[in-house]
Amino acid sequence: MTQVGIPLSNLRPGQRATILRIGGNRAVRRRYMEMGFVRGEDVLVERVAPLGDPIEYLIKGYHLSLRQADAGHIMVQVSDEHSR
């Protein structure tokens, strides 16, 4: 059974998700993986800038900001827990 998921950029502050798949070309996928975005890892949306870009995430214990377009390459499954 294949899990489709939604783009990471669609999540709102306070939502948690598990990474399912990283899209993009090989160089882009490698860059995301080096930053900690790997399949199976949990990610929390910390906050969104006033104009919607960039978005701050908490992954592997550190804060990371991505542009909305970049976050759109990362497919996730929203977790049931909605707490921080």
Image: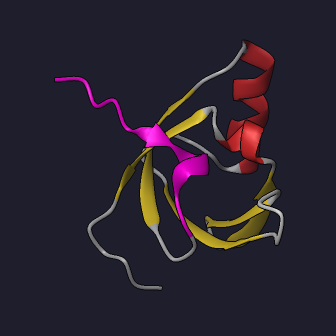
Colour convention of the picture: secondary structure
Question: Is 17 left, or right, of 4 in this rendering?
Answer: right
Percent across and percent down for residue 37 are 62, 46
In the figure, 20 relative to 62: above or below?
A: above
Residue lying at 42% horizontally and 52% vertically, measured from the top left: 18
What is the span of residues highlighted in magenta in the rendered image?
A: 1-12
Quarter location, residue 51? bottom right
Q: Is residue 57 left or right of residue 11?
A: right
In the depicted structure, whether residue 32 falls above or below residue 13: above
Q: Return the residue found at the far front.
A: 51
Q: Is residue 20 left or right of residue 61?
A: left
| Quarter occupied by residue 4 | top left
Taking 64 as reference, is 71 left or right? left
In the image, 57 versus 7, the foreground residue is 7
Is 7 included in the stretch rendered in magenta? yes
Residue at image location 24% in from the left, 23% down from the top: 2
